[in-house]
Image: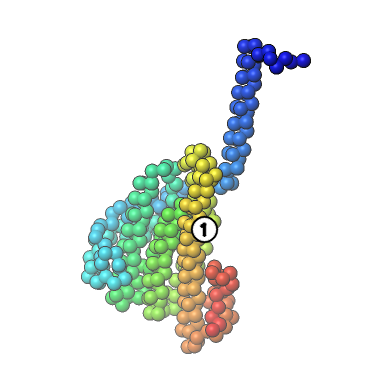
Amino acid sequence: MINPDVAPTPSKRGTILRVGLTVVVCLVAVLAITSSNMMKSGATPPPPLPVPNAFDDFVRAGGLVTNPVPNDGKLKGAKPDDLRAWVTANAEALKIARTVLNNPSRVPLIYSQDFTKSMNRVGLCRQLGRVLTAEGELALAEGRNADAARSFLDVVRLGPSLGRGGLLIDGLVGVAVESIGLDGLGRCRAGLGADDLHAAIKALREVDAGRDTFTEVRNNETYWSEHTFPFYQRFMLKVSGAGKKLLEPAFASGSTAFQRVESSNRNLVVEMAAQLYAIDHKAEPMLDSDLVPAYLPEMPINPSTGGRFTVVK
C-alpha cells in the first residue's frame, strides 16, 4: 500500500515526468495529424502548363501597350481619331495577340503571398483586352460592322484564355474582358450578314464550352491556398471563421459574375440564330423548333433559371 505522506524519489519523479511528456507529445501529434487531415480539401492540382503557353505571349503583348487609353478608358464613347491613333500605336501588341489567340493558354499559378507579380500580370492582360476593344469600337464607329464583329469576337475569345487555370482574380478579369466583347458584338450584330452570323454563333459556342467553370476556379483557389499559406495560418483562419467571412462573399460575387457572362453569351447566340432565321424566312421565329436543329443543335440552358432559353414570347 502506498503511503501518501512519503514523497516520490527523484528517480520516480523523473519517470513520471518522462511519461507525462510522452503523453503530451503523443496528444499533440495526434491533434496535428487530425487537424491536418481535417484541413485537406481534396482540391486537385492544376494540369501541366501547355508548351508553348499563349498566356505568356498575352502578358508580353500587354506589356507593349502604350498609354494613355483614349477617353480615360471609356472606349465606347471615345473619339474615332483617338481610337485610331491608339490602335495604330499598338499594332505590334495586336499582332502578337492574334498570332497566339487560338493556341492553348493557362495561367501559371504563383505560390507566394506577395501578390505584386500576379497583380502586374492582371493589369497587362486588361490592357491587351482594351486595345482589342478599341479596334472594335473604331470599326463600329466607321460603319464597318463585319470588321467590328471580328474584333469583338477576338475580345470574347481572349477573355477565357486570360482566366483559364488561374485564381479568382484571373477568372474575374477573363469574365470582364469577355463581357466587354459580348457587349460590342451585340451592338454590331444588326449589320451582319448570314456568313458573319454563322461564324459568330460557332465561335461563341466554342468559347462557352471552353471556359473554366466556377467550380474549377474554386478548386484552383483552394489548391493554391493549401500550397501557399502555412498550416498554422490556415488552421487559425478555419477555427476562427475569419477565412469563411473573407472568402465566401468573394466567391458568391464571382459565381454571379460567371453566371452572368454565361447567360450573356448564350442569349446572344439565340438572338443571332433568330436573326439568321429572319434573314432566311423574312419573319421572326415564333417557336423554338424554328431554330432547332436548323440553326442551333439545341436551345442553350439559361444558367440563371436552369431552364432553356426560348424564343416563345
Name the side, left or right, on which 58 lies relative to 49.
left
Q: Position of residue 119 (x, y in %)?
A: 36, 50
Q: Does residue 180 sit above or below 213 in this rendering?
A: below
Q: Is residue 230 visible?
A: yes
Judged from the image, the secondary structure of the residue bearing numbered disc 1 is helix
At x 55% / y 75%, what residue is drawn? 309
At x 42% / y 56%, what residue is drawn? 162
Q: Position of residue 178 (x, y in %)?
A: 42, 64
At x 50% / y 59%, what residue is drawn? 252
Name the side, left or right, on which 25 lies relative to 162.
right
Q: Quadrant of the C terminus?
A: bottom right
Which amino acid type is marked by label 1? Phe
Residue projecting furthest to the bottom:
282
Q: Position of residue 292 (x, y in %)?
A: 57, 77
Residue projecting furthest to the right:
1
Circle 1 is placed at which residue position? 214
* Residue 152 picture quarter: bottom left
Q: Does residue 14 sit above or below 141 in this rendering?
A: above
Q: Is residue 45 visible?
A: no
At x 59% / y 80%, what residue is drawn? 289
